Amino acid sequence: MGDEDWDSELTAGPSFSFTPSFPKLETEKAFNYNESSNKGISESVERNTWLPRNRSSGFEGGEDEFPKSDGPSRRGFGADRGFGFKRGNRSDGEGSNFFGRGGFKGRNEDSGSENAKGFRDGNVEEEFGEKSAGRGFSHSEDTFGQRRGRGAAVRGTRGGFGRRDENNDEESHSSFGSRGGYGNQTSYEGRERGGGLRGRGGYKGRNEDVGSDSGQVKNNYPFKSDEDGENGDKPAPYVPPPPPETEDGIFAHYKTGINFDKYDDILTNVSGINPPPAILTFEEANLPETLNKNISKAGYAKLTPVQKHSIPIVLAKRDLMACAQTGSGKTAAFLLPILAHMMQDGVAPHSLDLQEPEAIIVAPTRELINQIFLDARKFAYGTCIKPVVVYGGTQTFHSLRQIYQGCNILCATPGRLLDIIKREKIGLTKLRYLVLDEADRMLDMGFGPDMKTLITSPGMPSKEERQTLMFSATFPERIQSLAKEFLKSDYLFVVVGQVGGACSDVEQIIIPVGQHGKKDKLVEILHGLGAERTMVFVKTKKRADYLTTLLCQENVLATSIHGDRLQKEREEALADFRFGKCNVLVATNVAARGLDIENVQHVIIYDLSDNIEEYVHRIGRTGRCGNVGKAITFFDSDDNEDRTVARSLVKVLSDAQQEVPAWLEEIAFSASGTFSSIGSTFASVDSRRGVSHIPGGHAQSHIPGGHAQSAFAADDDDASWD
Ligand SMILES: Nc1ncnc2c1ncn2[C@@H]1O[C@H](COP(=O)(O)OP(=O)(O)OP(=O)(O)O)[C@@H](O)[C@H]1O
């Protein structure tokens, strides 16, 4: 990633992470949201001490004068409407966890003190490491034990993961240190279900529930970690809250929108040789009964277009590149056929030896990969198939422990995945499916090298021996050609609608606003939106913190998510937004892709990204699954980056039948050069330009005006995290 782009509003200096405190909502009591975890919040709201606790603001004079605080307003977002809590009986206090699509339910941790420890000297150091208490893993190589006492000392600390570059969100992939703080292992004793360490039979075939009710299994790990956070000022490495365990929590979902049926009107092209015919219903897919039950519990009654085409293709064991608009069900499009195969073919029974997942799913951000994991867990419910999620910013020991309990589907961010492979904690020889979600992002300069490392890792089956699936709402032609290295030559390319087209359910409004007018305009809009849930996208982490502080001063319940915040804080911020404790989430591109949050009614793009793909993904946080939404974009005609993307923006607007302001059109077409030189449009054709077989017999349509390569930025200030 490139250096952080310091903005004129912010003088150089230590960044701070702002964690606004929100008043406890009545509805939180229903979720047994631990008093203690709220104490810090309520107390700080009382004392108005919600200002950043960590460092000087680094703001000097003028509009950068650090906003005075009068504390966030006490409007309890949605509390009176029971917002977001429409799923079944939550009387058991259960709910989905930070990332479940339902309301918030996280483990009750005292988040109040975290901020006091979370940051120092402008850097966030992540401590990882496993200092086993003497006994390594039971299998042959006690890599754990070997690590005792050996740490990648970081700045004199006792080891720890490669320190994060304060200007770069990506974790280095250096080896882990020997020790780090530790979360609460006891919470894992006996809590895992179905993942018993004792051998389990594989799936017994169609329609049999196996190993789903092994009840509470005592986890007699052959190792213990005595990692602790005894170094007082260092936060223990984060151990995420356990995923929901009740059916209500696992199957929490929101309703499809009024436009769901309109999906059927979207033209779908399938290019490649001999594609299997699309299916029209779930029944036609002839899926195992348990899977069909889970699909129904998840509220899926009708297939979306990408599912209609992708499910039979994956079931036919073909490689696939699928492009469909945001919020149109791409996750299930790959999960369902993979799970169906696993249920029908059976999966290896859990062994105490090296875990060898049959499927690996990668995505660019931790929050997204966790969301995919929760979907996998949902659809695998009642079977012996075990999804596991590992991602950066969490204690490595925790990741390994999850894998150790059994791992058929590994959902991972690249950094953590590669480290676990390097440490030989998983084997790849049994891999049958490799899935790249947000694939264009995974193949760009940010993650491309990691993906290359992955497919060349020891034991990784070649592309001929595995099934590789790639999904995204955007697929620039340059990325299509990069993808060939990962896909069999006869892969199929499914395009629902326009490659890279924006979601048709999102009303897109572009308003001319100069840099210095943006803050006031943002406050004005948000005051007008009241309690409606809004995501605000900015370019830099520092601006995310700055604006969040400013909004809270303006009595807007806002929080922020970006790569400089501790993972625990990121998850809390996302939970506060999902839970309805605040109605504005200020985010960098860390939240641009994939996140599926109920009832995001608005997206405000405060800073345009320098590539149009991120614009499409950002506005796709609203208008999901047939619901409608609105995206307002601030366009600064004095900003070169905005001008560069103007022409692509006009194309996205016109392709989505949106109004194109005359002033924008003028800017877009006054710029010299062709599409390819000044900005991105989309490859709307299969870059193989081969003969295409399209269901219904019509030929592959070539978009008038040709196609061009998209300028693909991989060095966004906060563009990739793992
Ligand atoms: N067939 C279906 N019926 C009802 N709801 C569905 C169906 N398929 C998916 N959904 C729901 O639609 C929402 C969006 O799905 P998903 O997140 O997979 O979209 P996506 O295409 O991956 O979006 P993005 O491009 O932003 O990642 C989710 O809440 C999902 O549970």
Image (spheres, rainbow, N blue to C red):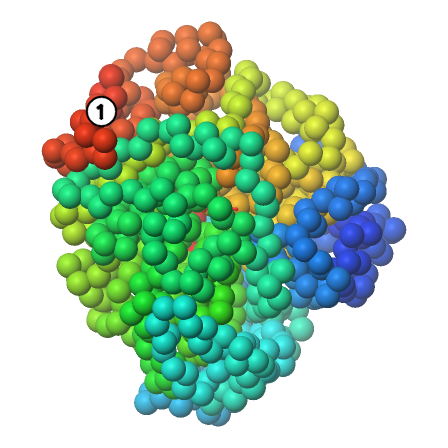
Instruction: Classify residue 323 by image quadrant.
Output: top left
Residue at horizontal 24 percent and vertical 17 percent from the top? 704
Instruction: Name the residue nearer the viewer: 102 or 307.
Output: 307
Q: Position of residue 237 (x, y in %)?
A: 56, 69
Q: Classify 10 Å Cα crowding around label 1: few (below 14), some (14-19), many (20 and above).
A: few
Residue at horizontal 32 percent and vertical 77 percent from the top? 348
Is 603 above or below relative to 240?
A: above
Q: Position of residue 552 (x, y in %)?
A: 74, 39
Residue at horizontal 41 percent and vertical 40 percent from the top? 304
Instruction: Name the residue nearer the viewer: 111 or 31.
Output: 31
Is the distance from the Cβ of mark 1 to the nearest ligand 1 atom less than 8 Å? Answer: no
Q: Secondary structure at mark 1?
A: loop
Instruction: Name the residue nearer the viewer: 258 or 594.
Output: 258
Instruction: Name the residue nearer the viewer: 283 or 374.
Output: 283
Q: How many marks?
A: 1
Residue at horizontal 12 percent and vertical 33 percent from the top? 691
Is 223 above or below relative to 532?
A: below
Direction bottom: furthest residue: 134
State the residue position of label 1: 701
Instruction: Classify residue 151 by image quadrant.
Output: bottom left
Res. 158 visible in picture: no
Res. 502 visible in picture: yes
Is 68 above or below relative to 684?
A: below
Q: Position of residue 264 (x, y in %)?
A: 40, 32
Q: Position of residue 191 (x, y in %)?
A: 59, 78
Amino acid carrying mark 1 in the image? Ser
Direction right: furthest residue: 46
Is 64 above or below relative to 721?
A: above
Location of the C terminus by quadrant is bottom left
